[in-house]
Image (tube, rainbow, N blue to C red):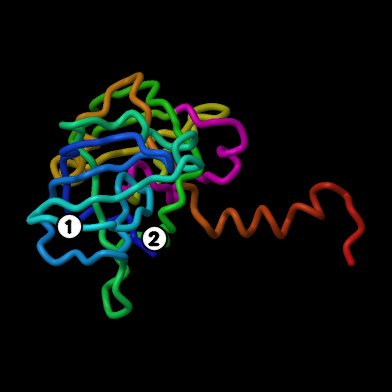
Amino acid sequence: MFTGLVDAVGTVASARTTSAGREITIESPYRDLAPGESVAVNGACLTVLGTSGLNFTVAAVSSTLPRTTIGEWSAGTRVNLERAMRADSRFGGHIVQGHVDAVAEVSAREQSGDALLLTLSLPEGLAELVVPLGSITVDGVSLTVNAIPGPDTVQLSIIEFSRSHTTLGDVHPGARVHVEADVIAKYVRRMAAPYRSGAEIP
């Protein structure tokens, strides 16, 4: 499990396609990663296959590639990183599973005072899991929903700290980002589904 509080920004050193999917080597500040450890890379939970110095290698299986941008990563791509949460750590963000729900497109970017406003166009079905001032994860960053300006859209307010400590400051209209909806909203939708459909409740 993760919290959406990015603790480092890494750089893809190499990426190659394998029979199982995509293998990525990332340069990072981490010095004590171990094979088998989970790391959220732009919000996608990936398993460390091995390490070499400050580099670590992860793999994304073929089923992960269609629902993420991992297949587009190449040498030089900057990625947000977060190690799995420790049981004795402070819970500063929100519950993030590292299971990317979909890829959204940035439709607008504007400066408002000291905040950067990003508007995302969400894939069908995801907007109903988003509420104003609720939580959402974008490229691994825990964010608060600033507004819902229209159907299948969400506006986010990025503070200066997040801009300078993650890759979100580099995002412009047309960019594709990973989105993970709040897991609590997913459970609520699941439990409410029979009532919404009019089905008989056992």
Give the image quarter of residue 12: top left
Residue 22, x across and y down, in percent: 36, 39
- 165 and 150: which is toward the camera: 165
The residues tagged by marks 2 and 1 sit, at their Cα atoms, a distance apart of 29 Å
Residue 74, x across and y down, in percent: 24, 30
Report the number of discs.
2
Please say whether residue 154 is one of the residues in the magenta stretch: no
Disc 2 packing (10 Å; few <14; some 14–19; many ≥20): many
Question: Residue visible at 21% across and 44% down?
Answer: 25
Residue 175 higher or lower than 147, as above or below: above
Q: Amino acid at mark 2?
A: His
Left or right position of 68 against 89 = right
Residue 76 higher or lower than 187, as above or below: above
- According to the image, label 1 marks what residue? 51
- 63 and 109: which is toward the camera: 63
Q: Secondary structure at mark 1?
A: strand
Q: Amino acid at mark 1?
A: Thr
Residue situated furthest right in the rendering? 200
- According to the image, label 2 marks what residue? 94
Left or right position of 132 against 167 = right
Residue 154, x across and y down, in percent: 46, 34
Between disc 2 and disc 1, the foreground one is: 1
Question: Residue visible at 39% across and 47% down?
Answer: 137
Give the image quarter of residue 7: bottom left
Magenta-drawn segment: 121-141
Mark 2 or 1 closer to N-term? 1
Question: Residue visible at 41% across and 40% down?
Answer: 21
- 8 and 56: which is toward the camera: 56
